[in-house]
Amino acid sequence: LAELSKKRAFRMTEQRRTILEALRAVKTHPSADEIYETVRRALPRISLGTVYRNLEFLADKGVIQKLDVGGSQMRFDGNPKNHYHVRCVDCGRVADVDLPVSRTFEKVKTVADGFEILAHRLEFIGRCPACRRRKRRR
Amino acid sequence: LAELSKKRAFRMTEQRRTILEALRAVKTHPSADEIYETVRRALPRISLGTVYRNLEFLADKGVIQKLDVGGSQMRFDGNPKNHYHVRCVDCGRVADVDLPVSRTFEKVKTVADGFEILAHRLEFIGRCPACRRRKRRR
DNA sequence: TTATTTGCAAAAACTTTGCTGATAA
DNA sequence: TTATCAGCAAAGTTTTTGCAAATAA
């Protein structure tokens, strides 16, 4: 990694920059295809594969975060620092939670079965305002 | 649901029973294909589709739990009560965590953005004993 | 008897990858 | 100049589904 960045063995291409900007511009936590649709407006020839490759690349570099929250798709977060999320049961929308990271859980170093703990991930499951309204109407 | 169970509109087939027994017999949290491989030993003609359908069915009925922990596959738990899990970063193995469910997080009813909170899900990410050993050797 | 369930195969949904030409530095 | 990167299309992985035959109750 240190070698890589020293040698500058990666480029800031138009595609990479546009993807990163698109992700940083929103506070939602878009999936790869949502980012693809956004970026496509600026770069109509970009491919979905390129979007996936760059998101993976940026997450590897610690510039962004790949969120493996519940649901069938990965989501991406322009903020690489650990924080908690809520996911809407109905529409799958993901948002940040305004709670600090638990000091208690951060201190856990081992659990039963001899697992060595590296991190923890907390996700709230709920209903977003839009879906609450939709449900009330029904 | 009440109607369904009153009318007994479901059967306890050989396949369903075998799948449930296989899941209850282990404390690992197997994926659908792992359960398929196990059940196949008793019922060689069973199809993967049947395994998926029954796991979904049993989870819907609250008999088992479908775990949407990180990773590309769903995992299943014979214990339907909410509890926390650890997942091994290296091999994906999932185990139960010997921590009580957080009263603090259980009390959270809303978060920023007006989400109505229904539940929470905590997952530790770690390294299982086998993978720790494997890593030390390298 | 008959509504539910199965096996099979095809499809769906999401993501990764091989290859060739393009391009950032 | 050249190693990295993009576009394209094909393939991989996991899960779902349509349909006709089988079966639990």
Image (tube, coloured by chain):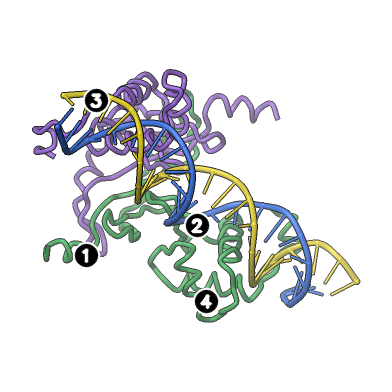
Chain colours: A green, B purple, C blue, D yellow
Q: Secondary structure at mark 4?
A: helix
The answer, for residue A121, to whether it is visible in the render is no
Determine contact: label 1, label 3, CB under 8 Å.
Answer: no
Chain bearing mark 4: A
Q: Nearer the viewer, residue A6 or A91?
A: A91
Pointer 3: what residue?
Answer: B12
Of badges 1 and 3, nearer the viewer stands: 3
Residue visible at 54% across and 25% down?
Answer: B129
Q: Are marks 1 and 4 in contact (CB under 8 Å)?
A: no
The residue pinned by badge 4 equals: A40
Of badges 3 and 4, the one in the foreground is: 3
Residue at the spot 22% in from the left edge and 52% down from the top edge: B117
- In which quadrant will I find the C terminus of chain B? top right
- Distance from the alpha carbon under mark 1 to that under mark 4: 29 Å
Q: Do the residues marked 1 and 4 share a common chain?
A: yes
User: Mark 2 and mark 4, same subunit?
Assistant: yes
Q: Nearer the viewer, mark 1 or mark 2?
A: 1
Between disc 1 and disc 4, the foreground one is: 4
Q: CA distance from mark 3 to mark 2?
A: 44 Å
Q: How many marks?
A: 4
Q: What amino acid type is highlighted by mark number 1?
A: Pro
- Front-lying residue, B105 or D13: D13
Left or right, A60 with respect to B66, comes to: right
Relative to B25, say whether A14 is above or below: below
Between marks 2 and 4, how big is the CA–CA gap? 21 Å
Image coordinates of residue A69 in percent, x first then y, are 40, 50
The chain letter under disc 1 is: A
